[in-house]
Every structure is written in structure tokens, then in C-alpha cells.
Amino acid sequence: MLTRARDDVGWPALVLLLLLALAPLAVTGVSEQGILVVAMIYAVGAVGLDVLTGYSGQFSFGQFVYFAIGAYVMAAVRIHAHWPWVPAIIAGVVAAALVAAVIGSLFVRLRFFGSAVGTFFLGAVAVDLISGARLSHWTGGSNGLAVLPVTIGANSLSEGDWLYYTVWIALAVSVALCLRYTKVRAGMAARVVKENEVVAAVLGVRVFREKVRAQALAGAVAGLGGCMLALDVGYLSPDTFGISQSIELFAIVAVGGTGSIVGPVLGAVFFFSLVNGFASTSASASQLLFSLVVLAVVVLFNRGLYDLVEQAVRKLFALRRAPAATGAPEGPKTARAGDAPVAPDEQPVPAATAEDRPRQAPAGPPLLVLESIGVDFGGVRALGGVDLSVARGEVHAVIGPNGAGKTTLLNCISGIQPATGRVVLDGDDVTALPVSVRRGRGISRTFQHPSLVADLTARQNVEVGAYATHNGSALLEMAGLPGTRRRDRVARERAVAALELLDFPASRWGVHAGELTMGEQKHIDIARALANEPKLLLLDEPTAGLGEEEIDAVAGAIEGVRRAGVTVVVIAHHVGFVRRIADRCTVLDFGRVLTSGTAGDVLSDDQVVDVFVGAGGKS
Amino acid sequence: MGLALSVIVSGIAFGLLIGMLAFILVFLYKTTGVANFAVGNIGMFETFIVYELWKDGMGLWPAAGIGLVCSAVFGVLIYQVVLRPFGGSQANTLVRTVALFLLLAAMADVFFGRDQPYHFPSLLPSGGTKVGGVLLRWSDLITVGIVLVIVTGFVAMFRYTRTGLQFLAVAQRPETARLLGVRATRLSTIAYMLAGCLALLIGLLLAPKQLLFSQMMNPILLFAFAAAVVGGFTSLGGTFVGGIIIGVATDLVSTYLGSDLTLASALAIMLLTLAVRPNGLFGTAQVRRL
């Protein structure tokens, strides 16, 4: 259902819009053109719903609320305030966007499930309110509201070619806005949010705000669709904006294919051709057919129409170009998590250990100080008063058996996990700061399971992490002003620098993250954390699940990071790896610091060996 | 005051129906991991089947009995034919239930709906009794009784049967339960079978009060969602408490403020609950590992 989101649909969108622009030449019947008009009106809103669902991972089963707001506001300000129609449409769109932002910010907290139910609910409530007596001065209640005619010169925009092309322009505007959104920082950030909200927050993305932005954009274009609907029908009644329309709109997006912008337009044309093809028999029969088609698509072919068309076109081109295929990406690298030989813990110390390296004496005050950090998970003491001090420029390993609280400790430092005690970074108490702000102060981290956005390329994934801040107006971003472009360029340069620092092969930069090997994903995760030029890099098991060669590569990367002057706290199980990279080492056991010191001393400590080997060998 | 009390009493009876639908929602959510938008319409469609049987001259009780058997089969079919094949993500399943919601409404319109809405005969006696000036309808009292019996049945099943224990295990820790050999598909099939029967029961109790038509379940489905959220979406027992809260509150609102605010008040209660207690009254926070 939530298929791959695309940002390469510019050409298909253009082709489809041109086809729709030319359609009146081929489709001359008045009623057939009328069908296309309605399809395009739905498509105006469907494209926005796709932004919401396909790109930011949210749901809405109540999108017609915003159609209603657009339509009613436009009609009402013309009747009551005598506004000309252009400002009235703008008012409708802005009102829909504002309401969407407000309601969105309520529903955003409800997560995937709650927002689906909440929006569905809202759709029903809106119909009640529109038809009820309370707002009837503005909405006409259940009697409805006549839309004043809209004209340019002597031509009415409510009929014929004028209507068709007015609606077409609205669709073009909606598609252009939404396409633009998918390409700017806000759109990329939304896709990280869709993938994993916690990861997004750690990258400095303001999760809440990005979700609300997507809501507002979807609401705005739905409002525009509502204005067009008002032009088309000429008379607003509550039944036009019911839950079933909202659900149909969602079904249109699902059938067309989420995450493709173009798909929903296809879906809308398909839906209305189908429904009206059978309208002569009976309205409910065509509904039956449509719901059967939706179900069939969702069950059997859940990627939707767009994917189908795209694959067909690909095959066509592939046949043309046949043998001279461009350098296909070489198959995945051989080393896989499972089949790599597991390194014995007491393996011989590699030649270049941390001991041999020239070591600057920890200069000045420590970069990170933790004071009696404590975390309880409902009666289970995960961390019981951990004190830790990490010197500037060192690589500090945290080791310990499973369940010792290592990841929880990193979560406390990065702010994901509320804890008692104090976290002091560079002399500043950051304990009270939220996750995304800590990122801005210079704390970056990676995860045990690198949650990359599968449908962004390796390089784009790093770019999302490379923004110094995710503040700023999405509207300005979409306008592409010089300031924004400069900001994007800086992010790109930082991303490239991070990738180069890690020696990530440039031939793989353009590969979608979903197609990278585990080892490569771990590298990209580190690069993404590094791209923001942090003071402190937290690595959560960068070697877990990797083969010997890949572990070597990660160790090399960490050494590169260290040379670049970044302080590193790394969780690891692999003793050889720890010996190679760590300056100092802290052992956690049952949420307490067992011992702390130079890596060599700690690893030969009897107590530590006991915890590791005595507790059942490799943990 | 007498009016208010009567409203409250009928609100409680209606609230228990809401709670029962919410119970099905949560029960399915806990066993199959998805909120099923189609539950209401499943009940509506099954009620139509009973209505058709009755209209063709069958007695109401035999028709209801046959309807119950059909509902069990229907529930199994829905799971096996619509929801299980090529089982996808949570989002995919959610959309499947929405498509099913549309499909069942369209099917009811096409097959049965020519002259809807219909009057549906009541299985329960009419009339009532007055206790201290408060009108108690027999149908309300019997509804309360039926819900109590069903709840007791479920509690007994969860506590004393192997299958019931497996339901609890799946609800608590789906992955672990599966690893321990719980056959999830079988459980889900049973869950949908039970859900189908309960949905019919709700339809039979509800249809005489309002009317029988293809959209009849939409409001109560919304109330049930609100009740489930208020009760905490992970708590089976909480759904009935949530249902009663929603039932009484919406009854009071529609009596004293006007029916156009009924749904809005349920939505408001739901949002308020989420703002104050994000996991509902009885829900527990779900901890996620990174």
C-alpha cells in the first residue's frame, strides 16, 4: 500500500497534463467532458492526499472536509462580503490550509491508526455541522448554498471549455506544487518521518512540524479542488462533501498508486470513467463495480496503476535499447550478515591498536559528562546512576552484555529517553533539551538498525542529515529563493564531504538505499550522522551483523572520523574491533558502570572477562 | 430530572451496544493488528440477510438463527478471501477493510436496497416499567443482560480455554506467541468468525431502534471508534466503559443541545481523552525498541 515514493515523476506528470489539455479535441461529447472535469477536480485533491500518504506516511479518510471548506468559504465571502472571485478562491484555499494545519496538529499525535479514525470521524462531523442550524447563516444548512456565477468578460467559468481549462489550470497548479514539495528539503524530511519518526527527530527533523506541513499542503489543494467543485456544480449541498466522497478519494489514490503524484490523477480519471460508464444502468451498480476494483487492486496489485504503467514503459524502452544496457549496478556484495565467520572474542590483537597511535592527552574539560543517569522501565532498573566522562577527540567504547543498558545510555544522551540525572555537553547542561535541538548542539547518532529511507538514494539520505537546521518556511523553500538554494548547496557539499571521509565508493552514491548491502547501509547511517558536522558522534553497534571485511571497513571509517576531530562514543561487542578503535572503554553491566579506563586495561581486567566469558561467552 | 435519568438509562443501553462494537474492533485489532472499518457494515449486511429470510415468510427467530450461522461463515470468508491473501503491511490491510466497507454498502444497495430504509421487527418485547419515575424499557434491560452474558462468555473463554489463552498471548506479544507455536492464522479465522456473529447481534438489536438501510452502521461505528479510544485501544474491558461514556454523553447532547452536535461531541470526547491520557483510560503504553 505505502509503496515507494518517487521524486522522478516530472516528465510523466507533464505528459499526463498535456494529454488532459488535448483531451477535449478527442472527447467532444458534453457529458464525457463533464466526466473529465469531475475527474480532474477530484484529482486536484487526490494529488495532495498522495503527498500526505505517499510521502509523509499519514492517512486521511476525511479529505472532503477541506473540499467543503474551500467551496463554502469561496461561495460565502462572495455572497456576504462581495469579494471578487479571484480573492474568494484564494480565501477558500487559505482557509482550507489553515484549518488543515490546526486539525492536522491535533491528529498528528494520534499516529497512523488514530489519524485514520480521526479523519474519518471529522468527515462525518463536518457534514453534520454544514447541514445543521448552527452555521446555516453561512452554509445555508441543509438547503444548500448557491454559488454566484464566475465570469471573465462574457464567458462563464462554469461551463464548456472555460470550465474545462479553469479546472485544468487548477490541476496543473496542484501537481506543480506537490511535485515541487517532493523535491525540496521539507519533502525529503517528510519521507524520513514516514520511514521512522525517532530517526527523523535524531536527524534534527522537526517531526511534528513536517507532518503538519504536509497536512496543510494537502488541505490547501483540496480547498482548491473544492472551489473548482463549486464552479462546476453551481450549488453547494452537504451531501456533496460526505464521508463516502472522502473514502472514494482515498480509494482513488490507492488505486492510482501512492507516492507517485501522477498515479492519483490516473486513478481519478479511471474511477470516473468507470463509474459513469455504468451510470446508465444504476448508480449503485457502478459503486459496486468500483469497490470491487478497489479491493482487487489493493489485494492483488497493491502498487497501483502508476506502477503498472511505469513498468510497461520501462519494458518498452528496455526492448528498444536491448543490448547496450548502461552499467547495471553490480550485484550486492558477497559478505552477508549470516554467513560471515563469527569472530572469536579472544582473537589476536590487530597490528595497529589504539595503544600504538600517538595520543593527545585529553585537553581541557571533557566534551561530554553524564552525572548519575538513571532510567526505570516500570520497575526494571535499566540504568542505575551512570557517571561517565568523555574527553574531547577520543573514541570511547561502551561494552557490556546484552541488556546492560548500552543503547538506553545512548538514548539518554541523544534525548530519546527521558532520564534522571544530568547530561552536560561542552559545559552546557542539555538535559532539558528535546531531541532535535540536541542535534543542533552537536550530538549525532546512528542506530543498530539503520533506518534509511529506502526510496531515497544513498546520497540523498546523507543530505537530509546535512542540514544545519530544519527550521524555515516550506513555502519559501518551494519558491527556490537564493537563500534556500545556498542552504541546499551547503547540505549537498557536507553530504559529499561526509561520504568522502568515509571512503564510500562514489559509484554507489546514486543507488536507492533499499538496494544497499547491510555494510553499506551502516556506512550511510554514519555518514548521515556525520554530515551535520557534530561534536559528538554516538554509534550504536556499527558492527552488528557485519562480516569481518565489513567490520574492518567500519573501523577504518571510525578512524577517519576521529582524525577529523569528532569525539565518538561507540557501542560494540566485538573485542578485536574495540581494541583497534577505542582510546578508552567503559563496561556496563546491569545498568551500572563496572569499570572504565584505557581500552587495553579494561579488556584485560579479570572482572570484565568474567562478565563477558563467564556469563556464557559471546553475548 | 426524570427525563435526564431516562436519557441516561437508555444511553447506557445504547452505550453497551457501542461498547460491543468497540469490543469487536479491539478484539480484531489485537489479534490481527488492524482496525477494521468494515465491522459495522458486516453487521448491516448480515442483518439484511435475516430481514430477507423473514420477509420471505420465515419466523424471526429461525431467521436470526440461520443468520447467525451465515455470519460465522461470512466472517471466515472475509478473513480468508479478502484480508489474508498476499497479506501486506498494516496500511494495506487497513485499506482493504475500507474497500470492504465500500463494497458491503454497495452490495446492500444493489441486492436489498431498492426500497430502503425498512422497518425491522424487534426480537425483544416492547414496553417497559417505571422505577421511581424513571422509564426502563424492557429492550434496554434485555440488551444489558445480553451484553453481560457475552462478556462473561468471553472472559470464560480467555480464562479457561486453550484458544482463549492463545488469544491473550497473541494480544500481548504477537511475535513471541507465534514463535511459541500459536497458529496465528487459525486464531484470526476464529476471531473473524466470532466478530461476524457479534456484528449480526448488534445489527439485530440496533435495526428495530432506527431503521434498516445500508448506511445504518456509520454513526455507531464512529461512536465505537471513540469508545475504543476512550477505553484505551489495547484494553478489551475498557471498551464497554468507553461505550457507556460515549453512549450517555451523546444521548444527553442530542437531547439537550441538538442532534447535529452528537457526532461532534463524541469526537470531542475522543480528542480530549487523547490529550489528557494518550493511551485511554485503561490502555498501556507500547514500548518500541530501536
Image (cartoon, rainbow, N blue to C red):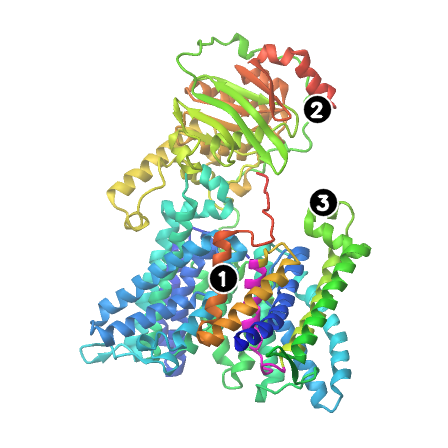
Crowd class of label 2 (few under 14; some 14 to 19; many from 20; radius 10 Å): some
The kind of residue on which mark 1 rests is: Ile
Q: For residue A150, say whether it is visible.
A: yes
Label 1: chain? B
Q: Are marks 2 and 3 in contact (CB under 8 Å)?
A: no
In this view, A350 is above or below B35:
above
In this view, A383 is above or below A326:
above
Residue A262 occupies quadrant: bottom left
Asked which secondary structure carries label 2, the reply is loop
Residue at coordinates 50% horizontally, 54% vertically from top-left? B274
Which sits in the foreground, A537 or A286? A537
**Which disc, if any, is residue A550?**
none
Which sits in the foreground, B4 or A84? B4
Q: Where is residue B143 in the image (x, y as percent from the top left)?
A: 68, 74
For the residues marked 2 and 3, what is the alpha-carbon distance in whole angstroms?
Answer: 23 Å
Q: What is the residue that sits farthest to the bottom in this orientation?
A: B57
The kind of residue on which mark 2 rests is: Lys
In this view, A540 is above or below A563:
below
Mark 1 and mark 3 lie on one chain; the one further toward the N terminus is 3
User: Does B220 appear in magenta?
Assistant: yes
Task: Please tell me whether mark 1 or mark 3 is closer to you in this view.
Answer: 1
Which sits in the foreground, A495 or B9? B9
Q: What is the residue that sits farthest to the front in this orientation?
A: B132
Q: What is the residue that sits farthest to the left in this orientation?
A: A153
Q: Do the residues labelled 1 and 3 touch (CB within 8 Å)?
A: no
> Which residue is label 3 attached to?
B176
Asked which secondary structure carries label 1, the reply is helix
The kind of residue on which mark 3 rests is: Thr
